[in-house]
Amino acid sequence: MKAALIQLCVCDSETSEQRWERVEQLLAGLDDVDCIMLPELWGVGFCNFDRYLREEEPLQGLTVSRLMVWARRLHCYLVTGSFIECTPDGRRYNTTAVLDPDGQLIGSYRKIHLFGYDSQEPALLTPGGHTAEVSTSYGIIGLSTCYDLRFPEQFRHMVDNGAQLFAVTAAWPQQRLDDWRLFCRVRALENQSFLLACNHTGDCGGTIGAGHSMAVAPDGTVLAEAGAEEQILMAELDFQDVQQFRRQFPALHDRVPVK
């Protein structure tokens, strides 16, 4: 799998439509990729809490329908990054969708762990209740969002459900960059799985995005890491490496139930 992580600059100086135009320019420049990822709440901006209700959308609303075109055009899997999903019962979620190379919606994930530290996310949104593992022609991808990285039980549950790759969309701040780099490596290593983590950059609501999107191998090796500015990070993954490493070093098999 050849993956492209779009580490987008999300800043308050542009409108959502201007950001969309920039994203589509970046997509238009991609060729010969198998999977594309975008970061968390890149359209709204994570810290722009006053925009959550104004820019909410149904699951198959603006974000999914507009990116479906690009998944078909580039004939690749596309992890949309997250958006504010609204449901008929009046609930709102931080939701990420996955599109296949035909542009079809094949999976979605509602962020389970909402971030409450200096954040209105838990007051405005509803936490998701289930993990999400999406089958692709390459292998099974487990989805997570930003703060989820701090909760290893979620990733272990996804591995138990067959995940070989974790796709993490994020709006992780620069002030906790060391934590980000640590968690990305550890979540991959302890679960013997690939991990793709797509973060944003820029000043959003007074918080600077850390950037440093990365691809991590099942043995914890960083295969590729972005810097602090907007860029597209490329990484190539061979899913056979997951099974090979798990056979050679069978830590998952050696687990013992703890009471």
Image (spheres, grey):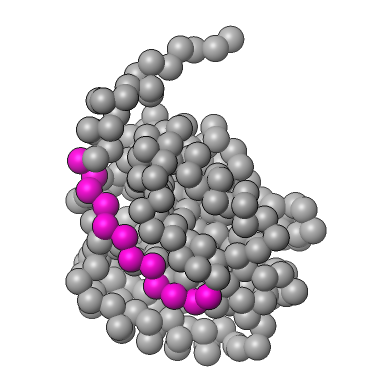
User: Does 231 lie within the magenta span?
Assistant: yes
On the question of residue 126 being in view, the answer is no
211 lies left or right of 221: right
Q: Is residue 99 above or below residue 55?
A: above
- Most foreground residue, 224 or 152: 224
As drawn, is 58 to the left or to the right of 150?
Answer: left
Q: Is residue 116 above or below residue 33?
A: above
Residue 236 position, x and y percent, is 26, 57
Instruction: Please state, as top left, top right, bottom left or bottom right, where the C terminus lies in the image.
Output: top right
Residue 11 position, x and y percent, is 63, 80
In the current view of this chain or complex, which residue is farthest to the top?
259
Q: Is residue 233 above or below residue 27?
A: above
Q: Position of residue 157 (x, y in %)?
A: 46, 32
Quarter of the view holding residue 139: top left
Residue 49 within the magenta-colored segment of the rendering: no
Please name whichever residue, 128 or 213, is drawn nearer the observer in this view of the structure: 213
Name the residue at 30% across, 83% down.
Answer: 29
Along the horizontal axis of the image, is 209 left or right of 158? right
The segment highlighted magenta reads 229-240
Tag count in the figure?
A: 0
Residue positioned 35% across, 19% down in the render: 253
Question: 138 or 178: which is nearer to us?
Answer: 178
Query: Residue placed at 33% from the left, 35% from the top?
Result: 162
Picture layout, residue 25 above or below residue 181:
below
Tell me what residue is drawn at x 54 percent, y 66 percent. 211
Residue 6 in view of the camera: yes
Q: In front: 84, or 139?
A: 139
Q: Split into 4 quadrants, where in the image is the N terminus?
A: bottom left
The image shows residue 165 at horizontal and vertical percentages of: 35, 45
